[in-house]
Amino acid sequence: MRRAVFVSDVHLGSKHCHAAEFADFLAGLQCRRLYLVGDIVDLWWMAQRRASWDAAHNRVVEALHALARNGTELVYVPGNHDRPIRRFCGLMLPAMQVRRRAIHTMLDGRRLLVTHGDDYDGVTHFGGLQEKFGDWLYYRILTGNRLTNQLRRRLGLRYWSLAEYLKRQSDAAERYIARFVHAGLEDARRRGLDGIVCGHIHRAALLQREGLLYANDGDWVESLTALSEEADGTLCLLSHTGQVLADVAPRLRLVPQDVPRAA
């Protein structure tokens, strides 16, 4: 039983969503609280293009309902692709809470800001034709990623992210990600918190920098990852198969004890 699990950028309804893998991940999940950290349902894609919704997408919805029935608390923090859901922020819906952002308190007492991450676009994006071309190219890369892994499945090979590999070869992409990490950590620092959990940029990461914790739970169109806080307070970055990709141990806490009085 995990204390908490964080997932984001599932993009249900878009053709690049790995709904089957996400449904399998949820089916084997046991946690006290599940944070849905934005872009779970891709309302933007479904409004602009033809929606892609099949039996695997229905399995995701059924798995979420099963978790709620079994006592898991669901907290939905909408992102930019499911922005209309922000109208319900602050409400206690029958199956979940909807929050603009949340604060998660870890077992060791550290407090983490939970937010999708699109609030930082103003300081990380440059705009203009370069950004529009980047968006166009990114979706072409995702198409290549999907076709590549269809072939790999037929050959009996494990999932491999072509999109992640290509982004790591781009200096511009790496600089953008560095700006995003800095913006998120500075936001947590200004709020007097110990770190941040976010998504948005489709780059899973778990690291400590200048005394703060940066955790990006990744996505389900490229990296197929999630973040978890285990029962002992360890933070783990997980693959869709449950493999631990990175972890951060909890801080030691001094537990006050009664000291025997001297005779």
Image (cartoon, rainbow, N blue to C red):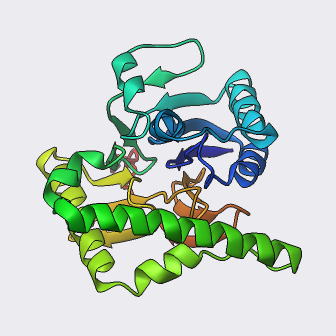
- Up-down relation of residue 256 to residue 92 (above or below): below
Q: Which one is in front, 38 or 195?
A: 38
Q: Which one is in front, 120 or 130?
A: 130
Image spot of residue 173 (x, y percent): 32, 76
122 on left or right of 213: left
Q: Which one is in front, 130 or 119?
A: 130
Image spot of residue 109 (x, y percent): 36, 47
- Up-down relation of residue 64 to residue 149 (above or below): above
Q: Which one is in front, 148 or 181?
A: 148
On the question of residue 174 being in view, the answer is yes
Taking the spot 41% from the left edge, 51% from the top edge, the residue there is 108
Taking the spot 53% from the left edge, 40% from the top edge, the residue there is 40
Image spot of residue 47 (x, y percent): 48, 33
Taking the spot 71% from the left edge, 44% from the top edge, the residue there is 26
On the question of residue 251 being in view, the answer is no
Where residue 59 sits, quadrant-wise, is top right
Image spot of residue 106 (x, y percent): 43, 47
Where residue 65 sits, quadrant-wise, is top right
